C-alpha cells in the first residue's frame, strides 16, 4: 500500500543527503592518498587498494542491498546504511594499521551502497508526479559531491589531516538520519529469502577481481602467475555458475542478447578506466612532483570535475535532439584530444596549460557519462532496464578498479612527468577504442534491439 507523501521535496532531500556519501567518499580519498602513504609508510601500489577495495565492495554490495531492501523494507535498509557508514567513519580515524583502514573503507562502501537502491525504491514507489525531476535532483546530489570531493578533501586534509575526510560524513549522516526517521515512508517488508542472494556468484566475482589486481600490480617486479591462474579459474567458474542461476549476481546471459549493449558496457568501462586514472593520478602527481599542497591540489582538480558538470546540460539537449550517438562521439573525441594534449605537458609548462588539459578531459567525461547511460536505455527493452542498469554500474566499478591497478603499477617505484606520460600513452590506446565504439553504435533506437 502506497503512503501519501505530502512534501516529496523533503523525501528527495533526505535520500539525496544519504546517496551523496558514496561518490563523496570515493572522490575525497584522491587528495588524501599522499598523506596516507606517509602515515602508513606505503608504496603507491599499496595505497591504490584504498581505491580498489571501495569500488569492489560497492560492486558486490549494491545488488545485494537492493534485494535486501525489497525483503526488509527500504526505510529500514536506508537507516541501516547510514549507521554502517557512521560506524566506519568513526573507526577509520583511529586505525591502528593499514589493513584495519582498508576494512573501514570496505565497510564504508557497503553502507553507502545500501543507500542508493533503497532510496531509489522509495522515490519510484512514493513519488508518482514529477518523478523524473526527483531523480534529476538526486543525480545532482551525486554528481556534485563527486565533482567537489577532491576540493573538499583537499581543504580538510590541509587543515585537519586525513582523519577529517572520514569525520566530515557526520553532518550529512546526522541530518539524513533524523529526517529519515520522520520523513521516509514505512513500506511493507517482503519475506526474507536467502536463496535470492547469489553469495557464491559474489564470492567468485570478488576472488576473480582480487586475483586480477594482484597480478597487474606484480608486473613490474616478481610476477604473480598464481594470481593470474586464480583470476582465470574464478572468472571461468563465475561465468558458467552465473548462467545457471535464476537470480544471478551478474546476468551473463543478458550480455549475449544484444551486442550493442555489450559494446556500451565495454566502452563505459574503458571511459571510467581513463577518467579515474586522471582523477586519482593527477592529485598524487601535483603533490609529489609539482609540490602543491592538498588545498591547492583540490582547487586545481575542480577543472577536471567541474567542467564535466558544466557541459552536462548541453549534452542533455543534444541527446534530446539527436539521440545519444552524437554526444557520445563528441565525448570520446574530447577524451582522445585531452589525453593527447597531456603528452605535451612537461615540467616547464605553466599551470594554466595543465588546467586547460584537465578542462578538455572534464568536458569529455561530462558528455560520456550522460550519453552512455542514454545509449544503454535506447538499446534495451523496457523489461530489461533494471538488470541493464545494474551491469552498467558494474562496468563503472570495474573501470575504476582497473584504473587504480594501472596507477599502482606505473606510479609505484617512480612518480615523475615521464611516468605520467606513460599513463597517458596507455589511456590514449583506450581512447582510440572508445572512439571506435562510439562510431560503431547506430543512431537513435528506442526500445529495440539492433
Image (cartoon, rainbow, N blue to C red):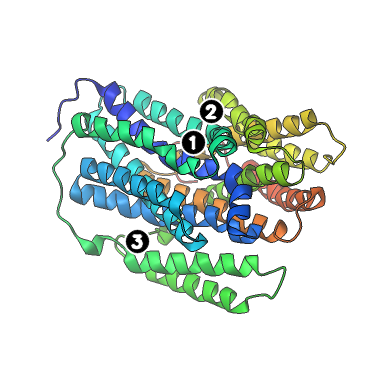
The 10 Å Cα crowd at callout 3, few under 14, some 14 to 19, many 20 or more, is many
Q: Which residue is mark 1?
A: 374
Q: Secondary structure at mark 2?
A: helix
Name the mark on residue 118.
none
The 10 Å Cα crowd at callout 1, few under 14, some 14 to 19, many 20 or more, is many
Cβ atoms at labels 2 and 1 below 8 Å apart = yes
Q: Which residue is mark 2?
A: 319
Measured Cα–Cα span from mark 2 to mark 1: 8 Å
Q: Secondary structure at mark 3?
A: loop
Q: Mark 2 or mark 1: name the one nearer the start of the chain.
A: 2
Give the percent coordinates (x, y) of residue 436: 68, 46
Q: Is residue 6 above or below residue 42?
A: above
- Of circles 1 and 3, which is in front? 3
Q: Which residue is mark 3?
A: 248
Give the percent coordinates (x, y) of residue 149: 53, 36
Left or right side of 222 for 344:
right
Q: Secondary structure at mark 1?
A: helix
- Of circles 2 and 3, which is in front? 3
Amino acid at each position: 500500500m502506497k503512503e501519501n507523501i505530502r512534501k516529496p521535496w523533503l523525501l528527495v532531500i533526505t535520500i539525496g543527503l544519504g546517496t551523496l556519501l558514496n561518490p563523496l567518499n570515493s572522490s575525497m580519498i584522491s587528495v588524501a592518498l599522499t598523506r596516507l602513504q606517509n602515515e602508513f609508510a606505503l608504496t603507491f601500489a599499496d595505497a591504490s587498494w584504498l581505491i580498489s577495495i571501495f569500488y569492489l565492495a560497492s560492486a558486490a554490495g549494491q545488488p545485494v542491498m537492493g534485494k535486501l531492501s525489497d525483503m526488509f523494507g527500504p526505510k529500514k535498509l536506508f537507516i541501516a546504511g547510514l549507521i554502517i557508514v557512521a560506524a566506519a567513519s568513526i573507526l577509520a580515524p583511529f586505525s591502528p594499521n593499514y589493513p584495519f583502514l582498508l576494512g573501514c573503507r570496505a565497510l564504508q562502501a557497503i553502507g553507502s551502497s545500501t543507500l542508493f537502491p533503497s532510496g531509489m525504491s522509495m522515490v519510484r514507489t512514493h513519488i508518482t508526479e514529477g518523478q523524473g525531476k526527483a531523480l534529476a535532483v538526486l543525480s545532482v546530489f551525486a554528481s556534485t559531491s563527486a565533482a567537489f570531493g577532491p576540493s573538499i578533501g583537499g581543504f580538510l586534509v590541509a587543515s585537519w589531516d586525513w582523519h577529517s575526510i572520514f569525520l566530515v560524513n557526520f553532518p550529512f549522516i546526522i541530518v539524513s538520519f533524523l529526517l529519515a526517521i520522520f520523513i521516509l515512508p514505512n513500506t511493507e517488508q517482503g519475506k526474507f529469502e536467502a536463496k535470492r542472494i547469489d553469495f557464491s556468484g559474489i564470492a567468485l566475482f570478488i576472488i576473480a577481481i582480487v586475483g586480477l589486481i594482484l597480478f597487474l600490480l606484480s608486473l613490474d617486479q616478481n610476477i604473480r602467475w598464481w594470481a593470474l591462474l586464480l583470476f582465470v579459474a574464478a572468472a571461468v567458474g563465475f561465468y558458467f555458475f552465473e548462467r545457471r542461476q535464476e537470480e544471478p549476481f551478474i546476468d551473463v546471459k543478458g550480455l549475449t542478447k544484444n551486442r550493442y549493449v555489450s559494446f556500451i558496457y565495454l566502452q563505459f568501462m574503458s571511459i571510467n578506466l581513463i577518467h579515474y586514472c586522471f582523477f586519482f593520478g593527477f592529485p598524487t602527481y601535483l603533490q609529489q612532483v609539482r609540490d602543491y599542497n592538498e588545498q591547492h591540489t583540490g582547487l586545481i582538480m575542480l577543472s577536471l570535475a567541474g567542467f564535466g558538470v558544466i557541459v552536462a546540460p548541453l549534452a542533455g539537449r543534444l541527446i534530446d535532439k539527436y539521440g545519444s550517438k552524437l554526444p557520445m562521439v563528441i565525448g570520446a573525441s574530447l577524451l582522445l584530444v585531452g589525453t593527447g594534449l597531456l603528452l605535451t605537458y612537461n615540467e616547464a609548462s605553466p599551470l594554466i596549460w595543465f588546467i586547460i588539459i584537465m578542462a578538455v578531459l572534464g568536458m569529455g567525461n561530462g558528455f560520456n557519462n550522460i550519453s552512455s547511460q542514454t545509449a544503454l536505455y535506447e538499446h534495451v527493452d523496457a523489461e530489461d532496464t533494471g538488470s541493464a542498469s545494474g551491469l552498467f554500474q558494474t562496468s563503472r566499478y570495474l573501470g575504476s578498479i582497473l584504473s587504480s591497478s594501472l596507477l599502482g603499477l606505473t606510479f609505484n617505484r617512480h612518480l615523475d612527468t615521464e611516468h605520467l606520460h606513460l599513463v597517458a600513452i596507455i589511456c590514449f590506446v583506450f581512447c582510440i577504442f572508445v572512439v571506435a565504439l562510439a562510431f560503431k553504435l547506430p543512431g537513435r533506437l528506442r526500445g529495440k534491439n539492433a
